[in-house]
Amino acid sequence: MNNDRRLLLPFVFLFVLLNAFFITGKSFLLKRNIDQDVLIVGNLVLFAATLISFWISVRSHRVNTGSSAVRGLYGSFMAKFFLIAVSAFAYIIIAREHVNKNGLFICAALYIVYTVMEVRLLTRLLRVKKNG
């Protein structure tokens, strides 16, 4: 359990670092027509979705059956995808013509960053589990 918490530290560090930049860099973001609120909320949604996805994947790999690993992989992907899709759809419906496209593109890039980090940590966890 303590080792699992240690695995979450890179996600927490990235989340805090990005939010610190988004909060302190408001003038920098405004000059580039990027809505600070979109980035902060988008980062929060991505952080939560990644933690849920990571938790599902780790839990499924603790059971030593192939089917549970596949179920966990698909389940974590679906949970992450639908949470992000519903959030983006809700933002687009609420904002209508005031949608901040630059903010959404940055959130899409952050999705890639969080996903790459998640895959690297899961790979490291499985490699240690396989060898240990």
Image: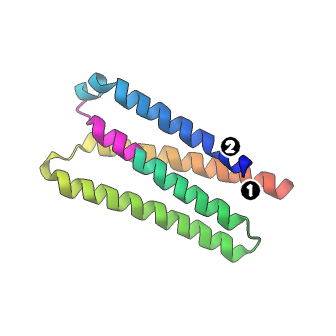
Check the image and report above or below for 57 versus 30: below
Does the residue at mark 1 contact the one at mark 2 (Cβ under 8 Å)?
no
Q: Which mark is residue 33?
A: none
Task: Give the residue displayed 23% in from the left and 43% down from the top.
Answer: 100
Q: Amino acid at mark 2?
A: Arg
Count the labels in the image. 2
Asked whether residue 124 is drawn in magenta, I would say no
- Nearest-to-viewer mark from 1 and 2: 2
> Farthest residue in the front direction?
2
- Which mark, by number, is residue 126? 1
Disc 1 marks a residue whose amino acid type is Leu
Q: Which mark is residue 6?
A: 2
Point 50% across, 43% down: residue? 113
For the residues labelled 1 and 2, the Cα–Cα distance comes to 15 Å
Across and down, in percent, residue 30 comes to 24, 28
Q: Secondary structure at mark 1?
A: helix
Horizontal and vertical percent for residue 108?
A: 39, 47
Part of the protein shown in magenta:
32-43
- Residue pushed farthest left? 97
Q: Residues within 10 Å of mark 2 (few under 14, many from 20)?
A: few
The image shows residue 92, relative to residue 42, as above or below, that is below
Quadrant location of the C terminus?
Answer: bottom right
Check disc 1: other Cα within 10 Å, few if <14, some if 14-19, many if 20+: some
Magenta stretch secondary structure, dominant: helix
Q: Residue at x 54, y 69 (%)?
A: 75
> Which picture quadrant has residue 101?
top left
- Residue 105, by quadrant, is top left
Q: Earlier in the sequence, mark 1 or mark 2?
A: 2
